[in-house]
Image (cartoon, rainbow, N blue to C red):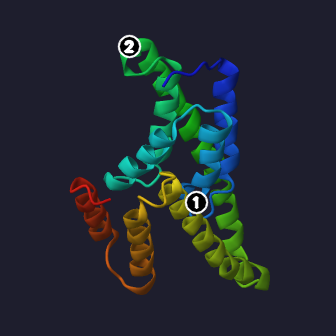
Amino acid sequence: MMVQMTAQDFWNLFQQFASLSLLGVGGAITSAPDMHRFLVEETHWLSDMQFTSSIAIAQASPGPNILFVALMGWNVGLNAGGGLVGGPTAWALGMLGILATMVGIMLPSSVLTYCATRWAHRNRDLQAVKAFKAGMAPIVIALLICTGWLLTAAHNQPGRDWPLWLLTAGAALLVWRTKLHMLWMLGAGALLGGLGII
């Protein structure tokens, strides 16, 4: 996939991820639906497959959860440079994409978290602080459900993809009702995908 991008587009990419950084309550993965809207639907800088693959690869890899943002930035930059065959120019643009997305997603939330945590720790006995903490749990859960829905619906073939929907519902139920480690579910999903069932 090839896209035309200017320096202003990379600045816009940074600004979009900086604004999402402040909305990523529960982690950057909760803002994936808006990332999809911006990168796939609005700007067409990524394909649906590149978007979902970035999340899937990063979630299956060891390391921090935020790696999917770096992969999205890398893919945006590669697309701007003509893909992997674009050579050093494409790779440099891929690194610029990583820089724009990662600094954008990390810097505002890190500064806000540092300042807010210091304030909340000093004022932990205030009723407002207790209410805020209690009210955030349902919001995070709803955002995670929205992300799961987006990743499952990306195939856009509900008649053929019923096993994928069933696997998503089963995984959500297991997360909710058991203490089964996530790696077992990732392994089961990989096995079912490798066998061609999903």
Instruction: Name the residue nearer the viewer: 66 or 124.
Output: 66
Q: Residue 38: horizontal and vertical position, in percent?
A: 66, 41
* Placement of 116 over or under 141, stated as above or below: above
Relative to 140, 119 lies left or right: right
Residue depicted at 44% across the width and 39% down the height? 71
In the rendered image, which quarter is residue 195 located in?
bottom left
Query: At label 2, which amino acid type do we have?
Result: Gly
Instruction: Name the residue nearer the viewer: 174 or 61.
Output: 174
* Placement of 52 over or under 115, stated as above or below: above
Residue depicted at 34% across the width and 69% down the height? 182
In the rendered image, which quarter is residue 10 located in?
top right
In the rendered image, which quarter is residue 140 located in?
bottom right
Relative to 61, 114 lies left or right: right
Q: Residue 122: horizontal and vertical position, in percent?
A: 70, 74
Relative to 44, 95 lies left or right: left
* Placement of 88 over or under 147, stated as above or below: above
Looking at marks 1 and 2 on the same chain, the residue that comes earlier in the sequence is marked by 1
* Visible residue check, residue 70: no
Which class describes the residues within 10 Å of circle 2: few (<14), some (14-19), or many (20+)? Answer: few
Query: At label 1, which amino acid type do we have?
Result: Thr
Q: Residue 104: horizontal and vertical position, in percent?
A: 62, 40
Which quadrant holds the C terminus? bottom left
Secondary structure state at the residue bearing disc 1 = helix
Q: Residue 142: horizontal and vertical position, in percent?
A: 62, 71
Residue indicated by mark 2: 87
